[in-house]
Amino acid sequence: MQKKWIIKNQPSPELIKSLSAQLNISNPIATLLAQRNILDFNTAKDFFRPSLDQLHDPFLMADMDKAVQRLIDGINKKEKILIYGDYDVDGTTSVALVYSFLTQNYGDNFFEFYIPDRYAEGYGVSYQGIDYAANNGFGLIIAIDCGVKSTQQITYAKSKDIDFIICDHHRTGDILPEAFAVLDPKREDCNYPYKELSGCGVGFKLMQALSIKEGIPLNILFGYLDLVAISIASDIVDMMGENRILAYFGIKKINESPRPGIQALIEIGDLKGPLSTSQIVFGMAPRINAAGRIEHARDSVKLLIAKNEEDANRCASKVNIRNNTRRDVDLNITLEALAMIENNEHFKQAKSTVLFKKEWSKGVIGIVASRCIEKYYRPTIILTESNNKAAGSARSVHGFDVYEAIAECSDLLEQYGGHTYAAGLTLSLNKVEEFREKFESVVASRINESHLNPPLNIDTVLQLDEISVRFYDVLRQFAPFGPGNMQPVFMSEKLLDTGKSKVVKEDHLKLRVKQMYNNSEFDGIGFNMSGIYPLFANGKEFSMCYQVQENNFGGNLKLELLAKDLRVTGQNAVHSTTEN
């Protein structure tokens, strides 16, 4: 698939010169900072040296006073309190954090956790969950990473004398549920200064407020930041502002003193430290998610709250087996979905993909949607049958808001929710074809050609002789990486193969490149890029987009270039943008 190279807006030379002088850094590093709106010494200090003192006052969040007082009243009255969360990584880490923190400080006699069954109950607050609470004497439910659009379910709970405290981070509907308190920084009437918290982040803020009110040392709560960091990385939320602080200290805890469940995940995934957001996303998150995709996500919570090595290893083994099963299932469904597109000319030519098969596993359809986008780069919804309904998972492409497109089809839906790039939906089985047609019409009217080629965003042009150990030492302090603070991608031009590049392990490209005008040489690796080797192997000048990384081979550390794309000079123009 042809990638569209986009060089980000470059700050003015005057700003770069000023920032370089203030911080004693190179121009490329100053460029990266300016692109992140870090324009002076003080903001740079806050960025490179995060502090937990920079966290916002949780009582700035709408309804926080009410939520904390209701929780304290429930604790004082020894009321049974149910911690309810979604079955994905954000939901299970949320439940693990709030349940563990409350039981650590108040005992475990009155607290219980509940994760809905993906297949029997579906996403969000379920009637079955409320009935469970009512039948077992719970007077308060804390719903985390879900609930802000569960208006009917919350009204039903109210009729059973059950109060709800909602801790959510998804977009709200036109009407808020009749909960006792709704904590969601995306509420229109919420003045909380940071809007991009994960669901676990909102649960953390509730516990922070409780700690302040009850005089619990905040260091006790900060011991749970590893769970917040996993939620932030896995839910692909913004990695600047408060999330960056939470993730920074959470990853520090993972690397220095991981809880038993996380240590078990590290070992069973053979993850090599120091761990980064990338290893969390690709090494930990799939295993945590797999429990709920294949059977039940309560196993993931049990893993995350395990108090000893034996219990943690047993739980980790269980979720790892589920993850292996999940891999087989999603591969088979992906192949089937791609064949459906290939064999239908209308599907191939459409601006969107909407596929339905009642036998597909509901637990992996989100993954399948993402896999389909890798081949057919366009908004994609994969649907299956669940509880006599069509349940779907949507994924989108850069710059296109799939949530808004689905909202345009709300007259055909029974339920929907999500984000710009990922959403879920439920509709009647007899409306699938009508929905497919309307969604395609909405997408076709909104999408343009710029959305249909995957962008390769380039931070700045770099000369190979600007790459040094000191350059890399500063560069890695930009971590943790994520949306809003992605790992920098550089472009270098006028490159030549030194004659030492070669294809390794059939699919990969082992590079040795040099720059024409400074003779700097660097090793590099291009995964699954063997097909482009003939384009430049004959001495043709080329440009390359890459990230700078460390290669530790045989105990020898050296810098290398991780190739993202290569292009023979003159082959295609490089696009530019004014976006930061």
Image: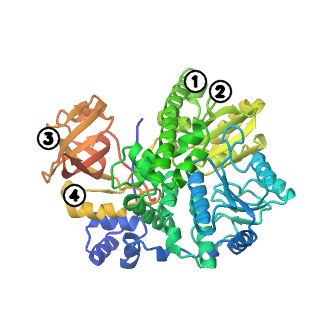
Measure how far apart labels 3 and 2 are at the Cα level. 51 Å
Q: Earlier in the sequence, mark 2 or mark 4?
A: 2
Q: Are marks 2 and 4 in contact (CB under 8 Å)?
A: no
Which residue has dot 3 on it?
498
Q: Is residue 393 left or right of residue 485?
A: right
Q: Between residue 550 and residue 497, name the one nearer to us.
A: 550
The percent coordinates of residue 2 (x first, y second) are 40, 37
Which residue has dot 2 on it?
357
Q: Earlier in the sequence, mark 1 or mark 2?
A: 1
Q: Earlier in the sequence, mark 3 or mark 2?
A: 2
The percent coordinates of residue 393 (x first, y second) are 62, 40
Measure how far apart labels 1 and 2 are at the Cα level. 10 Å
Foreground mark, 2 or 4? 2
The percent coordinates of residue 457 (x first, y second) are 40, 51
Q: Are marks 3 and 2 in contact (CB under 8 Å)?
A: no
Q: Indicate whether 309 appears above or below 365.
A: below
Which residue has dot 1 on it?
340
Q: Are marks 4 and 3 in contact (CB under 8 Å)?
A: no
**Crowd tier of the residue under label 4, counting other residues whose Cα lies within 10 Å: few below 14, some 14–19, many 20 or above:** some
Which residue has dot 4 on it?
467
**Label 3 is placed on what type of residue?**
Thr
Q: Are marks 1 and 2 in contact (CB under 8 Å)?
A: yes
**Crowd tier of the residue under label 3, counting other residues whose Cα lies within 10 Å: few below 14, some 14–19, many 20 or above:** some
Measure how far apart labels 2 and 4 are at the Cα level. 51 Å
Which of the numbered marks, if any, corresponds to residue 223?
none
Foreground mark, 3 or 2? 2
Foreground mark, 3 or 1? 1
Q: Between residue 136 and residue 345, name the one nearer to us.
A: 136
**Crowd tier of the residue under label 1, counting other residues whose Cα lies within 10 Å: few below 14, some 14–19, many 20 or above:** some
Q: Earlier in the sequence, mark 1 or mark 4?
A: 1
